[in-house]
Image: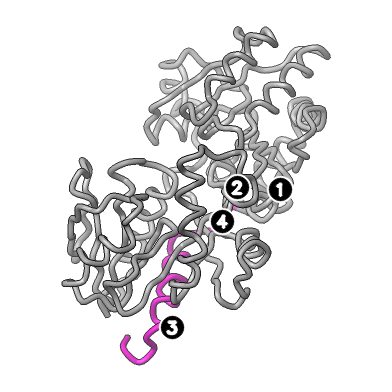
Amino acid sequence: MNIGIDVRLHAYAPGGISYYARRLARALVEQRAQESLILISHRHEQDPLTLPGVRNRTVWTPPHHSLEKWLLGAEIASLKLDVFHSTDFIPPAWGARRMVATIHDLNFLRYPEYLAVEARRYYNRQIRWAVKRADAIIVDSDATRRDLADLLDVAPERSVVVHLAAAEEFRPLNPEQIGPHLARHALRPGYLLFVGVWDPRKNLSGLLDALSLWRTRGDAPQLVVAGRPGWHGGEIHSQIAALKLEPYIRFLEGLTVDELVALYNGALMLVIPSFYEGFGLPALEAMQCGTPVVASNRASLPEVVGEAGILIDPDSPEMIADACRRIAGDPALQQRLREAGRLQAARFSWAKAAAETLEVYRGLLPHEV
């Protein structure tokens, strides 16, 4: 069976969905399956993914193009693919015998105000067509599966939940290992950590309000924000100035994986107060490092965190602040959360994700494996 994996997005937006596509491709190779894999990347790719025994095909069609579903089909038709896996929501109209689409979330339908106009317009135009076109649908979480049923009337049996996983690099480190990385950024262990793009959906604004509340009631740790500005990112700096929090916030961008692992290990806790997540990989990365987690009680996060973290209402800065203060003031609770988090994270793996994805492919052409 010839299977095409769409990894084009990495040429435009590394991280997030592109990380999923590339990490899944590696895990599929590690399964040593008899299927033949072909990676579909874009010609602008500066860091092409090369895997043993895997062919690469570069194409001109960029992701999120208005004519993508037609143009991409024309470019891949000569490959005679049995299955094409669109890892970024929208499968081509043709070009393979069967189409698989991974739908990571329906944020653009559930909370349209949290997405830039152009992105919202693209997904809204395409998504209803995509779920009808796909022969199989993969989702990152049960929460997204429920959203598909609620918002697009997709029968639950049409979608398969395949959970993501944290990379193996995310692991507990000793102080000697994290020290040089933290020193490079003039940090000491014991800070609050936020990881992700600062856009309205991630609710960094709510965390800033919580930090301000905490400071009015006593000393609060420094907040380290690891990520990059997103849509409306400039408003975050205005809020920080209004709350007089400038001395207590550090912004770090462009971190390497090693630096991010060290950052998790040095944190007192990760706070992920998002209004909506399709999965919530930073929560899993933190738990795998043994870092306590405070997470929103919305969408997929309760599914990922389970009982290994403290869940909060993202609309309540008071609840966020109280959860953080509770962990900060209770070393025994910190230790319990570290241990529970590592056990919870061990339930997720890329080997499991690859095996479940292979079953989806094989189920489309059961007699041709």
Q: What residue type is labelled 3?
A: Gly
**Residue depicted at 22% across the width and 44% down the height:** 45
On the rendered structure, is 311 left or right of 61? right
The residue carrying pointer 2 sits among few (fewer than 14), some (14 to 19) or many (20 or more) residues within 10 Å by Cα, namely many
Mark 3–mark 4 Cα distance, whole angstroms, equals: 27 Å
Q: Earlier in the sequence, mark 1 or mark 3?
A: 1
Q: Which of 288 and 235 is in front in this view?
A: 235
* Residue receiving disc 2: 277
Residue 46 on image: x %, y %: 20, 40
Residue 90 in sight here: yes
Residue 352 in sight here: no
- Quadrant of the image containing the C terminus: bottom left
**Residue depicted at 50% across the width and 27% down the height:** 226
Mark 4 and mark 1 in contact (Cβ < 8 Å)? Answer: no
Mark 2–mark 4 Cα distance, whole angstroms, equals: 20 Å
- Quadrant of the image containing the N terminus: bottom left
Q: Which amino acid does label 1 sit on?
A: Arg
On the rendered structure, is 261 left or right of 61? right
Give the answer, above or below, for where 4 lies relative to 315. below
Determine which of the numbered discs, if any, sits on residue 363 in the image: 3
Q: Which of 315 and 222 is in front in this view?
A: 315
Mark 1 and mark 2 in contact (Cβ < 8 Å)? Answer: yes
For residue 8: magenta? Answer: no
* Residue receiving disc 4: 346
* Residue receiving disc 1: 298
Secondary structure beneath label 4? loop
**Residue depicted at 77% across the width and 18% down the height:** 214
Q: What residue type is labelled 2?
A: Glu
Residue range highlighted in magenta? 345-369
